[in-house]
Image (spheres, coloured by chain):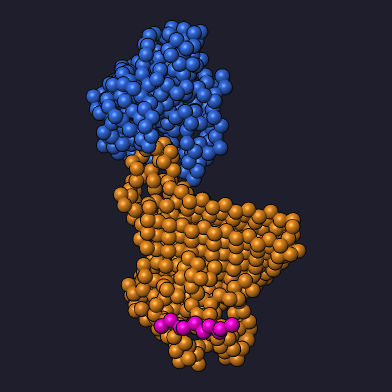
C-alpha cells in the first residue's frame, strides 16, 4: 500500500539533511509503529508523506497504491487517501468546525468525482462519529481547535480521520498531551477504524500508546533511517533498553 | 525670518476659482456663508493636505489631486442608478444622494417612524442656516484639516437626520450615496445625524459608484450623540473606479454614558482616505471603531483615527483588518488622546494586516498622547503573510490551495464583519467581501464546497 524507497530529505532553506535513505513499507490492513528518539526524523517523515512544503526531497520516492505522492500537492495526497493526524493540530480562528468538516469532505468527494454531501447526511455522519468519540456537539460549533484542550484537539483529529475515511492513516505522536482516559478514547477511535483495506503508521516515543493500539510491526528509526524492524515485542524491548544501542541518546 | 508663501498647485488654483464663481449659489445664507468663507480662507492658507503633514504622511492629496474636477451641480440620473437602487434592498429607511445631491424621489420621506425626521442638507440650510452652520464647526483635533475645510466650503447637499430622545428603531437608517460616474467631477457633501438621549439606532452609509468616470469625493458625516444613546454605524465604500480619489470624514461627538460602535469596510475603493475624529464629551462612554480594508491593484486605503478622551471613564476599542495584494497599500494611523483629568480611560487599538505578495504594503502608526495617570491604553499591530501552517493543515484535509486560502482570509476579516449586528446589513457586507475573495486569481467559484 504505502511504499517508501530510499527517501532523502533536507529542510528546504537549510543544508540540514533529516532523512537519509529511508525505506519503509506499510501493507493494507497493517498497523505499523515507528519508534525512535527525539530528532530521529519521525515527524519529518510524516510531514513529507503528507506534502508539507518546508522540505526538499533530494532522492527517493513515496508510492501510495503505486501512485507517486511526491508529484502531488497536499490536497491531492489527501484525496488519494493520505491522512495525517497532527501532533499539534492547528487552531483556525474564525472557521467554524462544521464549516471546515463539510468543506474538507466535499473537497475530497469532488476530487474523486463524487457528488457533494447533502446537509442532512453530513450532519448525521458528523453527529454519529462525534458521539462515538465523546465529542460534545457544542465543540463542533466552535471555531476549529480554538480553545480546545490537548485531548479535545486529538479527538477532533480522530473525528476527521473517521469522516474522511482515508486508506493510509499517519498518527504523529497522537499520545502526547493525553491523560490516560483520553488516550483510551482516542485509541478506541483508531482501533474502530482498523480495516483490511486501510494501513496505519503510528509514530510515537513511548510504548504506552502501543498497549492500546497494538501494532503488527514495529520499526525503529534513528538518524533518518529505519534501523530495525520487528513485531510488537520490539516495542517492549525498547521500553526497557532505550534507544542508546541505536547510536543515539534517548 | 523669511516669509514663505507657498505656490499654489494647479488644482489649488482651480479650487480658488471654483469657490469664487460658485459660492453665491451654495445653499445657506447668514452664518453659513461665513462658515464657508472662513473654511475656504483656511484652506487657501494651507492648500491641499500633503505628505509633509504628519497626519497625511501616507496619502499625499496634493500629489493625488493634480486637477480639481468641476463640482457636480445637477446630477443626471442614468438607468444604472435606477438599476442599482432596485437591487439595494436592505430592510430599513433609505435616504439617497446621487452625486452628493439629495434625491427626495428615491428616499423614504413619508411614514417615518415616530421621533425620526429627515431632510436634505440644502433644505435644512435654507430653513435654519444658523443652527446648521454651527454643526459645521470642526472638532478641536481636526481644526487644521484642510480636507475638512474644503468640505465645509463646498458641501452643497447631504442628508440631515434627527432622532428624538428615547427613540428605538428596530430597522436601520440607510444613507445610500450613489455616484453616477457620468463624467469626471467632484462631489462634496455633508450629512448630519443627531441622536437624542437614550435613543437606539443603527445608521448605515453605503458609498458606491455605477459609472465609468473617475471622480473626486469629499464627504463628511457628523454625529452628535446624546446622553445614554446607543448607536451602531456601518460604512461601506465599494464599487469605485480605481482612479477615484475620496476623503470620507467621520465626526462624532459622544455624550455621557453613550455608546458608538462602527464598522467601516473598504472594498474596490480606489484611493480612499477614511478619517475619523471622535470626542468623548461625557463620562462613562464607550466607542468601538472597527474596519476591513481589501486592497488590490493600486488601491489605497488610509484609516486615520483620533480618539479624543476629553472625559473620564471612557472606553475605546479599535480593530482594523487589512488584506492587500498586487500593489495595494493600507495605512493605519490611530491616535488616542487622553486629556488631563480624563482618568480611568481604557483604550485598546489593534491593526492587523495580511500581505499576499511582495508588492503589497502596509503602514501602521499608533500614537498615544496620554496626559492622565490612571489609564489603561494598549496598542498592537501585525503585518504578516497567510499562515503557512494553517494552509498546510487545511490542504492536508483535502482543501485545494485557493479554497484553503479563501477560508483563512474570510475568517481573518470575519472577526470584524461578524460585529455588524443587523442581519441584512451583515449580509450585504459579507457579499462584497466574498465577491472580492472570489476575484482572487485561482479562487474557487461561488458554490464550490
Query: Which residues are drawn in magenta?
Result: B1-10
Is residue A140 covered in magenta?
Answer: no
Horizontal arrangement in the rendering, residue A197 relative to residue B90 (left or right) = left
Q: Is residue A81 above or below residue B349?
A: above
Question: For residue B30, what is the image quadrant?
Answer: bottom right
Q: Position of residue B111 (x, y in %)?
A: 54, 74
Residue B208 visible in the displayed image: yes
Q: Is residue A96 above or below residue A223?
A: below
Q: Is residue A61 above or below residue A237?
A: below
Residue toward you, B204 or B46: B46
Task: Identify the residue at image location x=54%, y=24%.
Answer: A178
Judged by its main secondary structure, the magenta piece is: loop
Residue toward you, A86 or B211: A86
Is residue B7 covered in magenta?
Answer: yes
Which chain is rendered blue in the image? A
Quadrant of the rendering where the N terminus of chain A is positioned: top left
Outermost left residue: A66
Residue toward you, A207 or B155: A207
Question: For residue B260, what is the image quadrant?
Answer: bottom right
Horizontal arrangement in the rendering, residue B335 relative to residue A20 (left or right) = right
Q: Position of residue B441 (x, y in %)?
A: 31, 52
Q: Position of residue B338 (x, y in %)?
A: 68, 62
Task: Identify the residue at image location x=48%, y=51%.
Answer: B383
Q: Position of residue B73 (x, y in %)?
A: 42, 85
Task: Identify the residue at image location x=56%, y=84%.
Answer: B3
Task: Name chain B's colour.
Answer: orange
Amino acid at each position: 500500500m504505502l511504499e517508501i524507497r530510499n527517501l532523502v530529505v533536507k529542510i528546504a532553506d537549510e543544508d540540514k539533511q533529516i532523512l537519509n535513505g529511508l525505506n519503509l513499507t506499510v501493507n493494507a490492513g497493517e498497523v505499523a509503529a515507528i519508534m525512535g528518539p527525539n530528532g530521529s526524523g519521525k515527524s519529518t517523515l510524516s510531514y513529507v508523506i503528507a506534502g508539507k512544503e518546508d522540505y526538499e526531497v533530494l532522492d527517493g520516492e513515496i508510492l501510495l497504491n503505486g501512485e507517486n505522492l511526491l508529484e502531488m500537492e497536499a490536497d491531492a495526497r489527501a484525496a488519494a487517501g493520505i491522512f495525517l493526524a497532527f501532533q499539534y493540530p492547528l487552531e483556525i480562528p474564525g472557521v467554524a468546525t462544521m464549516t471546515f468538516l463539510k468543506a474538507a469532505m466535499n473537497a475530497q468527494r469532488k476530487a474523486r468525482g463524487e457528488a457533494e454531501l447533502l446537509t442532512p447526511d453530513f450532519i448525521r455522519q458528523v453527529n454519529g462519529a462525534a458521539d462515538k468519540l465523546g465529542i460534545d456537539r457544542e465543540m463542533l460549533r466552535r471555531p476549529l481547535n480554538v480553545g480546545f484542550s490537548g485531548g479535545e484537539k486529538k479527538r477532533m483529529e480522530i473525528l476527521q480521520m473517521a469522516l474522511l475515511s482515508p486508506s493510509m492513516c499517519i498518527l504523529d505522536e497522537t499520545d502526547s498531551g493525553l491523560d490516560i482516559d483520553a488516550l483510551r478514547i482516542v485509541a478506541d477511535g483508531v482501533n474502530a477504524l482498523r480495516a483490511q483495506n486501510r494501513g496505519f503508521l503510528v509514530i510515537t516515543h513511548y510504548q504506552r500508546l502501543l498497549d492500546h493500539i497494538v501494532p503488527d510491526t514495529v520499526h525503529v528509526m534513528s538518524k533518518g533511517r529505519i534501523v530495525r524492524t520487528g513485531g510488537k515485542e520490539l516495542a517492549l524491548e525498547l521500553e526497557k533498553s532505550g534507544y542508546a544501542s541505536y547510536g543515539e541518546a534517548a | 525670518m523669511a516669509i514663505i508663501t507657498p505656490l499654489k498647485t494647479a488644482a489649488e488654483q482651480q479650487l480658488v476659482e471654483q469657490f469664487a464663481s460658485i459660492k453665491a449659489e451654495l445653499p445657506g445664507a447668514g452664518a453659513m456663508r461665513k462658515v464657508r468663507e472662513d473654511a475656504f480662507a483656511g484652506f487657501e492658507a494651507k492648500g491641499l493636505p500633503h505628505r509633509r503633514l504628519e497626519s497625511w504622511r501616507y496619502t499625499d492629496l496634493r500629489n493625488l489631486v493634480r486637477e480639481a474636477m468641476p463640482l457636480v451641480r445637477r446630477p443626471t440620473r442614468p438607468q444604472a442608478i435606477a438599476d442599482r437602487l432596485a437591487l439595494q434592498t436592505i430592510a430599513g429607511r433609505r435616504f439617497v444622494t446621487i452625486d452628493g445631491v439629495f434625491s427626495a424621489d428615491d428616499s423614504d420621506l413619508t411614514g417615518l417612524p415616530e421621533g425620526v425626521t429627515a431632510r436634505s442638507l440644502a433644505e435644512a440650510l435654507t430653513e435654519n442656516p444658523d443652527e446648521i452652520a454651527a454643526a459645521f464647526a470642526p472638532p478641536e483635533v481636526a481644526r487644521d484639516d484642510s480636507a475638512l475645510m474644503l468640505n465645509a466650503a463646498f458641501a452643497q447637499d447631504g442628508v440631515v437626520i434627527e432622532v428624538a430622545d428615547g427613540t428605538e428603531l428596530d430597522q436601520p437608517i440607510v444613507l445610500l450615496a450613489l455616484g453616477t460616474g457620468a463624467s469626471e467631477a467632484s462631489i462634496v457633501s455633508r450629512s448630519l445625524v443627531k441622536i437624542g438621549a437614550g435613543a437606539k439606532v443603527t445608521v448605515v452609509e453605503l458609498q458606491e459608484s455605477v459609472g465609468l468616470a473617475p471622480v473626486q469625493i469629499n464627504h463628511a458625516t457628523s454625529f452628535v450623540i446624546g446622553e445614554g444613546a446607543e448607536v451602531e454605524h456601518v460604512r461601506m465604500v465599494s464599487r469605485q473606479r480605481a482612479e477615484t480619489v475620496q476623503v470620507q470624514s467621520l465626526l462624532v461627538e459622544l455624550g455621557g454614558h453613550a455608546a458608538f460602535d462602527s464598522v467601516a469596510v473598504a472594498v474596490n475603493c480606489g484611493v480612499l482616505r477614511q478619517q475619523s475624529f471622535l470626542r468623548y464629551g461625557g463620562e462613562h462612554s464607550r466607542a468601538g471603531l472597527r474596519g476591513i480594508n481589501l486592497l488590490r491593484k493600486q488601491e489605497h486605503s488610509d484609516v486615520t483615527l483620533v480618539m479624543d478622551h476629553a472625559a473620564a471613564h471612557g472606553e475605546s476599542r479599535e480593530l482594523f483588518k487589512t488584506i492587500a495584494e498586487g500593489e495595494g497599500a493600507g495605512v493605519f494611523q490611530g491616535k488616542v488622546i487622553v486629556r488631563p483629568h480624563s482618568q480611568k480611560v481604557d483604550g485598546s487599538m489593534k491593526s492587523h494586516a495580511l500581505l499576499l505578495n511582495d508588492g503589497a504594503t502596509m503602514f501602521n502608526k499608533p500614537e498615544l498622547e496620554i496626559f492622565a495617570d490612571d489609564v489603561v491604553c494598549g496598542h498592537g499591530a501585525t503585518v504578516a503573510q497567510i499562515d503557512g501552517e494553517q494552509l498546510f493543515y487545511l490542504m492536508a484535509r483535502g482543501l485545494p490551495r485557493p479554497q484553503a486560502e479563501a477560508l483563512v482570509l474570510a475568517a481573518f476579516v470575519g472577526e470584524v464583519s461578524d460585529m455588524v449586528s443587523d442581519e441584512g446589513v451583515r449580509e450585504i457586507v459579507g457579499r462584497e467581501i466574498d465577491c472580492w475573495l472570489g476575484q482572487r486569481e485561482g479562487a474557487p467559484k461561488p458554490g464550490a464546497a
